[in-house]
Image (spheres, rainbow, N blue to C red):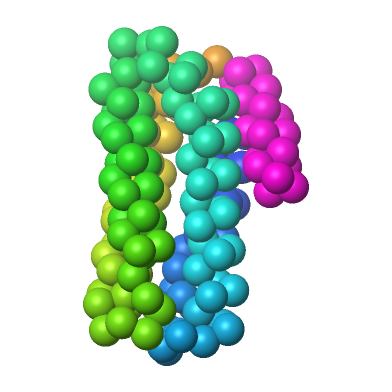
Amino acid sequence: MTIFEALRKDHDIQRDLLARLVETHGDSDERDSLYKQVKKELHGHAAAEERAFYIPLMEMDLTQEKARHSVAEHHEIDELIELLDETDYSATNWLTHAKQLQHLVTHHLDEEEQEVFQLAGRGLPDNQKTSLASEYQQEMERQRSA
């Protein structure tokens, strides 16, 4: 498995969780459960991805700018999660913020898959694509069990 396949697999999980989250209503157990899953998944993914994927990409001229941009988007996602944390589940603007999060994350994932992966595919040697996948998966396991 390459780093790109490993990341896409987790991107699909994030898309699914966010799609389900924005279909929830009010201060419900379902919303609380899904939101906690989304937060944990996004936080763990960002940490693992930055360590196993973006640090190596920042070392290459070809991918440095895109890698920095993607890390900056992780921070924007964190800020929106903080806003959701401060908003009551039953508040009318909670769903608005959740939909903003879904939009931001989806934009980030699409940009990553359509632009960053192509540049990284040209810049990374094949053996590193595989070793980075292992590093990423190990870090994700650590993040999910934390």
> What residue sits 48% from the left and 17% below the top?
56
> Which residue: 37% across, 48% down?
78
Q: Position of residue 37 (x, y in %)?
A: 58, 63
Q: Residue at x 31, y 49 (%)?
A: 79
Using the image as rendered, state which of residue 9 and residue 99 is in the foreground.
99
Q: Which image quarter: residue 64?
A: top left
Give the x, y percent position of residue 23: 42, 84
Is any part of residue 123 visible from this angle?
yes
Q: Which quarter of the image is occupied by the C terminus?
A: top right
Position of residue 18 relative to residue 106, above or below, is below
Would residue 145 appear left or right of 103 to someone viewing this image?
right
Residue in front for this viewpoint, 121 or 112: 112
Give the quadrant of residue 82.
bottom left
Camera-side residue of 92 and 5: 92
| Residue 24 percent across, percent down from the top left | 45, 85
Say whether residue 118 is left or right of residue 93: right
Q: Is residue 140 part of the magenta span, yes or no?
A: yes
Which stretch is magenta? Answer: 126-146
Give percent across and percent down for residue 86: 35, 64
**How many numbered badges does the structure rendering display?**
0
